Image (spheres, rainbow, N blue to C red):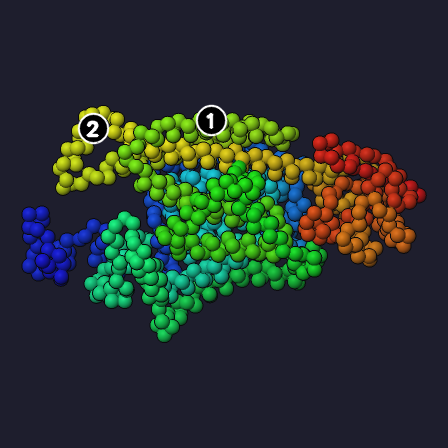
């Protein structure tokens, strides 16, 4: 039975006889096993640099798939370019980014270290190539568009490694049509670069690259809460060292992530001795005792792989800690510079230390609502089930197939969610860094449910899939009509609606192409499932089916086609609803600071050359009107000069100041040479973020000028600038000092 070196003998009728001494070079090689020359070069599975195992391993892109990917990215880039600079004024947070970028470009240290240096450094480099009147702002917009495209590429590569080509396309297309990815691509904020570096860190971690520490350091420098990546990577590396990843049959993982058998028979014997006996499955549905035994064996196999403390490679355990420390050094250096040179008062430390910052559990719901906004607009049980079922199936699939990747993803996603909940500021854009994780699990669960449904579809009633497919096709048409009506109904549009409709059609066409490709592949696999080289009867039956025509093939195709159409029916509202959510977010951001834009236009045309004005957020007017900073003052500066603290909670609009505060305000305005006061509308205090920023910007002082008759004597109304009626806001009011 056995030949040389204990190898199974091969019948002489199939191969030529081997030499008697059976040299290694002539030893027949089992397909899938490494050659003897490759064995010394293979890394140990416990090496953190070894790629993690997954169900699929990324293969090079085919020509057609590569062209399709390039076309989709090009179309997405054109979609971003068609909406370039949609806002009249930048976001309130932009001023701090531009301040740091200006300092970098001048070759000096900034005086404000509230933001991380990654995006400002890129803005400083990109501003040299911009001809826009606001070069830093223009550079930030183009940089974020590039980072958003890079985010799609990185998530596609990671999903392709874990789920295969179909799952990668589904994940990328659904991510591209979420509200936040296109919205942040049009903004000048840090989310696109932060999300890109987070996803790149996870991709490099799966591939076992040392560059994952560099990507994690860049993410940490983008925003400090991304520092959670560093302990996540350390724990993941420790887990691989203490309990290296194993194949389902107990074998180690090769250097390329492939699950190969072991090389030596001694190691095979050692592993069999250390592992519990496998439980044979004698039926498709195992009994309760069999299932219990299998679960027990799995639990014992996990603990059996762990090494005892006396045998742990402590030097190997120290390597990820040292790497994480080096990755943390840039952030510590930036924080050290902040302590030495920061002259600003608006810091995250102050916000976190404020006594009124409370836990906001609403962000937990928002984290799941934003990626699936097309389905989950309200807490409806059916809609929640349509999201929860694929997510649960995706968690099960990840736990079974790529557990070593799933655990870091979930720890980071849940840890980030917990940090923002504790921070107390539930903003939709804070979901940007984790939305792709839920979509990845959603795609994995969708594929798992589809495979399970195809395996259990009764062969005798395949014809029943035809009317089901027709019904689902009609439902898809109805979904498309409602989705496009939803896109067309948003008034007034910030960008032309045809741009969003064209991109929605592109995403749905791409999903349809992926679905059709998967359906055809499923039918072909089904038709070849029972054909074996040694079974002549099956081969003859297959040949007869081919001669009878395509009826049998069509019956095999119908269930997969019905399932594919059902998936499209579920994805259509995700795409159209996500882009409609992007429209709403774009409109909210566009009209949010409309009052500042109106005030800036008036000041640029009417403010005397030797006059100074005060307004709540002067940076908006500086951006629009190009006025120098010394001619515009914020109410925060006035409040600091008065020496009086901001009231907590903020004073309602229109309430006059007390006599002492009123006299102090007039004296400070006169001493600062301010001749004009601008009031812009503000909303009610709804969140803790409003409560903090209203106090920081001293809107209580601005609210003294909210009515037609100023609460402060010595000022007269010179201009009333109404905002659009549908906003239901008070007008912008401009007052002049009368002496």
**Position of residue 222 in the picture relative to residue 92 (left or right):** left
Residue 252, percent across and down?
A: 30, 59
**Position of residue 462 in the picture relative to residue 715 (left or right):** left
Spatial CA distance of label 2 from label 1 is 34 Å
How packed mark 1 is, by other alpha carbons closer than 10 Å (few <14, some 14-19, many 20 or more), is few
Quadrant in which residue 678 is drawn: top right
As drawn, the label of residue 735 is: none
Q: Residue furthest front?
A: 288
Quadrant in which residue 129 is drawn: top right
Q: Nearer the viewer, residue 322 or 235?
A: 235
How packed mark 2 is, by other alpha carbons closer than 10 Å (few <14, some 14-19, many 20 or more), is few
Q: Nearer the viewer, residue 107 or 327?
A: 327
Q: Residue furthest bottom?
A: 310
Residue occupying the point 46% across, 36% down:
570
- In primary-sequence order, the first of circles 2 and 1 is 1
Residue 7, percent across and down?
A: 14, 58
Quadrant in which residue 544 is drawn: top left
Q: Residue furthest right?
A: 739
Residue occupying the point 26% across, 58% down:
279
Residue 543, percent across and down?
A: 17, 30
As drawn, the label of residue 477 is: 1
**Position of residue 715 in the picture relative to residue 177 (left or right):** right
Residue occupying the point 43% across, 60% down:
236
Q: Nearer the viewer, residue 127 or 82?
A: 82
**Position of residue 435 in the picture relative to residue 341 (left or right):** left
Residue 220's place in the image compared with 603, above or below, is: below
Residue 694, percent across and down?
A: 74, 49
As drawn, the label of residue 546 is: 2
């Amino acid at each position: 039975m056995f030949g040389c070196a204990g190898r199974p003998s091969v019948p002489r009728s199939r191969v030529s006889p081997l030499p008697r001494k059976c040299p290694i070079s002539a030893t027949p090689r089992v397909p899938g096993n490494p050659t003897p020359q490759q064995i010394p070069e293979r890394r140990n599975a416990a090496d953190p640099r070894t790629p993690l195992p997954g169900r699929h391993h990324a293969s090079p892109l085919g020509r057609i798939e590569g062209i399709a990917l390039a076309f989709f990215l090009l179309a997405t880039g054109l979609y971003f370019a068609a909406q370039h600079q949609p806002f009249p004024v930048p976001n309130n947070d932009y001023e701090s980014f531009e301040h740091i970028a200006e300092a970098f470009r001048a070759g000096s240290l900034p005086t404000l270290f509230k933001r991380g240096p990654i995006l400002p450094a890129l803005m400083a480099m990109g501003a040299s190539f911009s001809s826009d009147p606001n070069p830093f702002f223009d550079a930030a917009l183009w940089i974020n568009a590039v980072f958003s495209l890079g985010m799609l590429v990185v998530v596609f590569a990671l999903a392709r490694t874990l789920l295969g080509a179909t799952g990668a396309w589904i994940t990328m297309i659904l991510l591209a049509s979420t509200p936040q990815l296109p919205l942040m691509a049009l903004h000048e904020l840090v989310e696109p670069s932060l999300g890109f570096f987070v996803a790149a860190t996870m991709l490099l971690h799966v591939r076992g690259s040392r560059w994952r520490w560099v990507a994690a350091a860049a993410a940490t420098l983008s925003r400090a809460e991304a520092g959670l990546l560093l302990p996540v990577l350390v724990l993941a590396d420790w887990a691989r060292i203490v309990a290296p990843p194993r194949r389902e049959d107990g074998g180690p993982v090769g250097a390329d992530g492939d699950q190969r058998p072991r090389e030596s028979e001694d190691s095979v014997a050692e592993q069999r001795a250390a592992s519990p006996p496998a439980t044979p499955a004698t039926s498709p549905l195992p009994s309760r005792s069999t299932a219990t035994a299998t679960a027990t064996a799995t639990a014992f196999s996990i603990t059996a792989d762990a090494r005892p403390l006396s045998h742990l490679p402590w030097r190997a355990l120290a390597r990820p800690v040292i790497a994480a420390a080096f990755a943390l050094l840039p952030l510590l250096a930036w924080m050290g510079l902040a302590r030495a040179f920061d002259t600003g008062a608006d810091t995250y430390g102050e916000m976190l230390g404020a006594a009124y910052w409370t836990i906001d559990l609403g962000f937990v719901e928002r984290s799941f609502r934003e990626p699936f906004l097309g389905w989950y607009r309200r807490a409806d049980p059916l809609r929640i089930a349509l999201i929860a079922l694929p997510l649960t199936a995706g968690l099960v699939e990840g736990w079974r197939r790529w557990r070593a990747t799933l655990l870091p993803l979930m720890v980071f996603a849940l840890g980030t969610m917990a940090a923002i909940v504790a921070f107390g500021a539930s903003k939709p854009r804070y979901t940007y860094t984790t939305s792709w994780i839920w979509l990845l699990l959603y795609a994995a669960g969708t594929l798992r449910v589809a495979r399970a449904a195809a395996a259990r579809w009764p062969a005798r009633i395949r014809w029943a899939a035809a009317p089901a497919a027709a019904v689902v096709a009609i439902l898809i048409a109805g979904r498309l009509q409602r989705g496009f009506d939803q896109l067309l109904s948003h008034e007034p549009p910030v960008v032309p609606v045809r741009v969003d409709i064209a991109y929605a059609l592109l995403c749905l066409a791409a999903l349809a192409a992926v679905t059709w490709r998967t359906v055809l592949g499923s039918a072909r696999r089904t038709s070849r499932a029972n054909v074996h080289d040694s079974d002549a009867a099956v081969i003859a039956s297959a040949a007869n089916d081919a001669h009878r025509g395509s009826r049998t093939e069509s019956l095999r195709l119908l269930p997969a086609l019905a399932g594919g159409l059902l998936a499209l029916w579920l994805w259509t509202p995700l795409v159209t609803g996500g882009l409609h959510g992007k429209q709403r977010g774009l409109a909210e951001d566009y009209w949010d600071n409309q009052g500042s834009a109106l005030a800036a236009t008036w000041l640029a045309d009417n403010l005397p050359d030797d006059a100074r004005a005060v307004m709540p957020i002067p940076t908006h007017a500086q951006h629009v009107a190009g006025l120098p900073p010394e001619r515009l003052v914020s109410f925060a500066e006035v409040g600091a000069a008065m020496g009086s603290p901001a009231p907590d909670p903020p004073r309602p609009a229109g309430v006059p100041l007390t006599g002492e505060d009123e006299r102090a305000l007039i004296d400070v305005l006169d001493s600062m040479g301010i001749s004009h006061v601008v009031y812009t509308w503000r909303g009610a205090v709804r969140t803790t973020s409003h409560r903090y920023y209203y106090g920081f910007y001293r809107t209580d002082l601005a609210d003294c000028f909210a009515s037609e008759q100023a609460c402060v004597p010595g000022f007269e109304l010179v201009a009333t600038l109404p905002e659009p009626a549908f906003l239901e806001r008070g007008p912008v009011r401009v007052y002049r000092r009368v002496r």
